[in-house]
Image: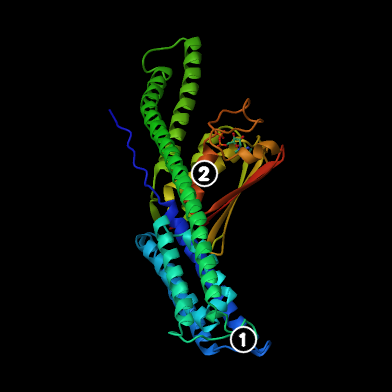
Amino acid sequence: MRQLQTNVHKTDLWQEELVERLKWLINIRWAAVIFIIAATFTSIYLFNVSFPDLPVYLIAIFIALYNAIFKFYINKRSAGNLHKTIRRFAILQSMLDILSLTVLIHFTGGAENPFIFYFIFHTILTSMLLSKKEAYIQACIISILTVGLFTLEYLNTLPHHSVNGFLGIDLYKNKIYTAAISFVLTSTIFIATFFTASLAEKLKNREKELEEAHLKLLEKDRLKDEYVKMVSHDLKSPLASIQSLLEVVIGGFAGTLDEKVKEVLQRIQKKTEFLHHYAKDLLDLSRIRAEKNLNLKIFNIKEAIDTAVEIASSKMGEKDIQLNIEIDAQLPDIKADRELITYAFLNLIANAFKYTQHGGNVWIKVSRKNGYIIAEIKDTGIGIPSNDMPHIFEEFFRAGNVIKTTKGTGLGLAMTRHIIERHGGTISIESELDKGTTFRFTIPVSAK
Ligand code: ADP
């Protein structure tokens, strides 16, 4: 007995989210660099405020430099590689930011500078990226650095750089002010850390739950595909045998048949043929869905279309339909899964024949544009009711105007869409009831 295998790869969505947020932080840092330079320039030259501007510009350059390195690193490493070091990467960025901001505050008025509250923005932004423990360690480091800076300036161990013309002079020497600003800053930082870190933790847990639910659904979907594949495979072979046996009996090779019996057997043959076709479509669809890699080969697309036209024409029966083929003579060979691309053309051409009345027209046009093959299969057939159009590529869907008149599985278009999208292409449809339908699809000249 065959076994259903389970092997869904667990993707770490949270890690991907972290990479996204780090990219976002890098963009914010560019804005911060521009802000520091612009604010320094305008306050000195427009508002005649004075403070040591050279260290401030140097800090801005330092921030820009490490930001550029981070940007280069995050763009260069593949997502898989980055995930192993992402935590350390986030911590390193946070530490460098804290250090730069502390030095910046030191050169622009220390405890007197209201921009010290920018540490709170920093806390909120980074606490989302770090673990709860790391976020609290970060809050401690900020508190130690800032309170340390204020104290050292208060004790004159570190020189104080006043911002003349803007900030209250010599407030840093005031014991009560220094103590109060230290208390307000550190308590706000810890409160911000508490709220952000607990919110981030809740979000992380929620995301984990959603991810698990998503994986379970994927797994169920995969099991369903496996199951359908197994059942359709097991149905297909005996159905093929029944068909061959019926052919032998109807052909009179097992003895002469009464006309009535022959008629009944022919009806059975038709039904079996449809069942066989159904099992084959189901099997093909589940195979395509389950297949991870395309069997890429370089081939001539015209040959694939010729094969599809030949098979579709053989299924058309007595119907007289004018087929017009316009294939760009300059079409290059393409790199794709030959079998699947032939299958996609076959589905669309066979449908065009199937849903076009006697005396109608079908066009196949294929050209090339910007590295893509553009194919169009157009017919003057029965068209599709507009309310059915949004569902036309869904599995098992058949439009209201065909259900009673023609037999079908509703799987061909779903499969075609899968094939095109797996190749990195797109498919679209235009249709007018009783006038005709056009399917257009693109595939890259060289699929990956
Ligand atoms: P099937 O043809 O076996 O029913 P498909 O998946 O190939 O299944 O097509 C789904 C539905 O789309 C068809 O049942 C039909 O309603 C509609 N359809 C597809 N191609 C055409 C066409 N060329 N003209 C009109 N209707 C079409």
Percent x, y of residue 188: 53, 62
Q: Are marks 2 and 1 in contact (CB under 8 Å)?
A: no
Count numbered badges in the picture: 2
| Mark 2 → mark 1, Cα distance in angstroms | 61 Å
Position of 307 with respect to 88 (left or right) is: right
Which callout, 2 or 1, points to the residue nearer the camera? Answer: 1
Rendered residue at 51%/67% (across/down): 183
Secondary structure type for disc 2: helix
The residue under label 1 is 41
Position of 115 with respect to 227 (left or right) is: right
Q: Quadrant of ligand 1?
A: top right
The residue under label 2 is 416
Percent x, y of residue 52: 54, 89
The colour style of the image is: rainbow
Rendered residue at 46%/79% (across/down): 65
Ligand 1: does it lie within 8 Å of the C-beta at label 2? yes
